[in-house]
Image (cartoon, rainbow, N blue to C red):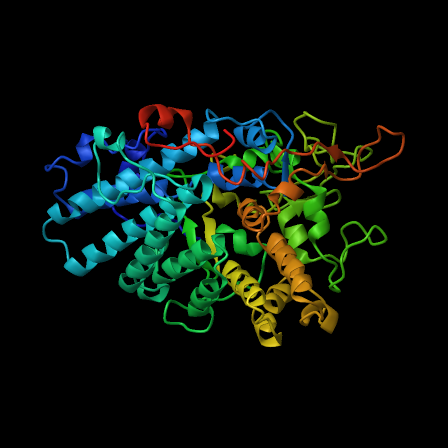
């Protein structure tokens, strides 16, 4: 089993002191320590700033919380900032709006600090220096993509700025920023090595394939189908940007022992004790040692998984048997088998009338607002059964979190080809068929072959395939926004499992509808603090 980070000699010593709280100003950390001429005396010190930029690229908190912003997951315990957004009650002071803005610009600050100072390091191989600059430029582009996707027009600058300068910046349009992102990713893709050109010690570094894949995703967010197909083609039909494929076992794809397989194009790096993430403590079954269930998968997500024969699930079918294997690999339902960290397998009991296994905490559904599941379901995805994945005996996980998988590339390609009216059996077999074969579908034409139907029919099929394949990985919120279906799916009452007996007989748990305004909520509010700092910023409509 790996013991990795991105293997720089100074990381284990530096990572704690380099972490920082999210700031809201554009002029944020690093402190003067990292811009002082005396700091940039060695490659190790430069690498410590590079490591910090990697750390700031994305957060496990957002990775998990983004699902609450979709119809995949319902937040029943407490009131997270994401729940406030989902219920339509967020204003410009919402903490998530502020923290996302501050985290992105904090990361951009680190990138600019690195680019402004790396040439001070003497004795560094020039080719290596250009590669490190390309990694930083990728991170900066990814942060700007995050910003403009959530907020639209935002300040965009490509060198370090002072506090006074930050207060005078005018926002650039979404289109201008996206044009820069595409050009930047094209340029760094030429410089970055492919995954095969890196040594094992460099596992986790940003690759040429990651730059191409992120560019495809950026085009996807704007529904530029021709460009999506073009960039996905660079990863599917050629190995010039790296050799990628599907890992054969979907559930074990998300286990630490397999985290550098050839499906993973980019992931957030974690290492035992030095850097871990602990969010699963609020999503896993209580019987597995979870603290509580903050949010649980919805019945709508469960229903989206097809039967193995390719048919949609109906109430005439068994609840969970003979289903797409990705259901069991992603979600814990009543009757699921769970293997604890001693290797002992037991049955998870969630039904209110069930009997809790001896010696285990109860996973049973007990109603709204309690510590147990609000929906009748828990997370399984990312819950690696190997005890060596965790530190301290709890849920401090060292499992890398996938940000871009080859499966996503296949789904983007299928969607683009369908929207271009170019979907045929060859494209289907290259994309959806491969995903379904891995998911354990029956070897029949109905399950695996291109369905007969219109473009609209295939669109629904591909959208559903995307939901199942990428469930609980934080993508659903972006999909329903770009499809402009958020205003529909997020305003409908949701459901949990058939565990509600308030009417005298068991029925589906009734979950309240969210609130999503088509005239406001496709963009987030510019944080109020930023508006006070910079009068040139323009608030998005409706806030």
Find residue 13 and report its horizontal and vertical position in percent. Answer: 27, 37
Give coordinates of residue 405: x percent, y percent. Answer: 48, 57
**Res 16 quadrant in image:** top left
Residue 210 sits in quarter: bottom left
Q: Tell which of 162 and 40 is nearer to you.
A: 162
**Residue 313 appears at what percent x and percent y?**
77, 55
Comparing 255 with 219, the one in front is: 219
The vertical placement of 481 against 88, above or below, is below
Q: Up-down: is 149 above or below 207?
A: above
* Residue at image coords 62%, 75%: 425
Residue that extends furthest to the right in the rendered view of this protein: 504
Residue at horizontal 66%, vertical 43%? 488
Q: Residue at x 46, y 24 (%)?
A: 93
Give above or below for 64 relative to 263: above
In percent of width and height, residue 505 lies at 89, 34
Q: Is residue 201 visible?
A: no
In the image, what residue occupies the spot 70% across and 43% down?
A: 346
Number of numbered discs present? 0
Instruction: In this rendered view, identify the residue nearer to me: 354 or 239.
Output: 239
Relative to 42, 196 lies left or right: right
**Relative to 226, is 419 on the left or the right?**
right
Is residue 303 visible in the rendered image? The answer is yes
524 relative position to 431: left or right: left
């Amino acid at each position: 089993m790996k013991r990795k980070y991105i293997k720089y000699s100074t990381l284990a010593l530096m990572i704690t002191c380099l972490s920082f709280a999210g700031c809201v100003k554009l002029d944020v950390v690093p402190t003067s320590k990292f811009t002082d001429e005396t700091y940039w005396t060695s490659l190790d010190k430069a690498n410590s700033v590079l490591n910090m930029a990697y750390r700031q690229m994305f957060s496990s908190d957002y990775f998990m919380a983004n699902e609450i912003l979709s119809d995949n997951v319902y937040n029943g315990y407490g009131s997270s900032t994401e729940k406030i957004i989902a219920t339509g009650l967020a204003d410009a002071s919402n903490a998530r709006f502020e923290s996302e803005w501050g985290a992105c610009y904090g990361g951009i600050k680190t990138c600019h600090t690195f680019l402004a100072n790396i040439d001070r390091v003497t004795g560094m191989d020039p080719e290596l220096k250009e590669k490190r600059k390309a990694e930083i430029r990728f991170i900066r582009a990814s942060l700007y993509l995050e910003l403009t996707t959530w907020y639209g027009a935002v300040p965009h600058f490509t060198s370090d700025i002072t506090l006074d300068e930050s207060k005078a910046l005018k926002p650039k349009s979404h289109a201008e920023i996206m044009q820069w992102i595409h050009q930047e990713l094209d340029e760094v893709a030429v410089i970055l090595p492919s995954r095969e050109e890196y040594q094992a010690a460099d596992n986790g570094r940003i690759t040429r394939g990651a730059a191409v894949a992120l560019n495809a995703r950026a085009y996807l967010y704007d529904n530029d189908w021709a460009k999506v197909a073009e960039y996905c083609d660079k990863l599917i039909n050629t190995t010039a940007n790296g050799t990628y494929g599907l890992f054969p076992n979907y559930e074990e794809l998300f286990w630490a022992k397999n985290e550098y397989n050839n499906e993973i194009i980019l992931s957030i790096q974690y290492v035992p004790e030095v850097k871990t993430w602990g969010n699963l403590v609020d999503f896993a079954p209580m019987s597995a040692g979870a603290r509580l269930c903050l949010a649980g998968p919805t019945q709508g997500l469960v229903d989206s998984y097809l039967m193995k024969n390719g048919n949609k699930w109906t109430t005439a079918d068994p609840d969970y048997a003979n289903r797409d294997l990705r259901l069991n690999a992603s979600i814990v339902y009543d009757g699921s088998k769970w293997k604890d960290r001693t290797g002992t397998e037991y049955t998870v009991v969630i039904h209110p009338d069930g009997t809790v296994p001896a010696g285990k905490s109860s996973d049973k559904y007990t109603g709204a607002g309690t510590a147990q599941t609000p929906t009748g379901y828990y997370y399984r995805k990312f819950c690696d059964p190997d005890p060596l994945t965790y530190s301290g005996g709890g849920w401090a996980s060292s499992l890398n979190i996938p940000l871009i998988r080859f499966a996503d590339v296949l789904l983007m390609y299928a969607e683009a080809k369908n929207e271009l009216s170019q979907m045929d059996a060859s494209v289907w077999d290259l994309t959806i068929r491969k995903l379904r074969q891995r998911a354990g579908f029956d070897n029949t034409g109905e399950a695996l072959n291109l369905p007969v139907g219109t473009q609209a029919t295939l669109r629904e099929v591909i959208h559903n395939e995307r939901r199942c394949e990428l469930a609980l990985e934080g993508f659903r919120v972006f999909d329903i926004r770009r499809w402009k279906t958020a205003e529909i799916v997020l305003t409908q009452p949701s459901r949990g499992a058939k565990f509600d007996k308030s009417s005298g007989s068991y029925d589906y748990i009734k979950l309240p509808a969210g609130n999503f305004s088509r005239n406001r909520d496709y963009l987030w509010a510019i944080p109020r603090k930023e508006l006070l700092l910079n009068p040139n910023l323009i608030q998005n409509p409706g806030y």
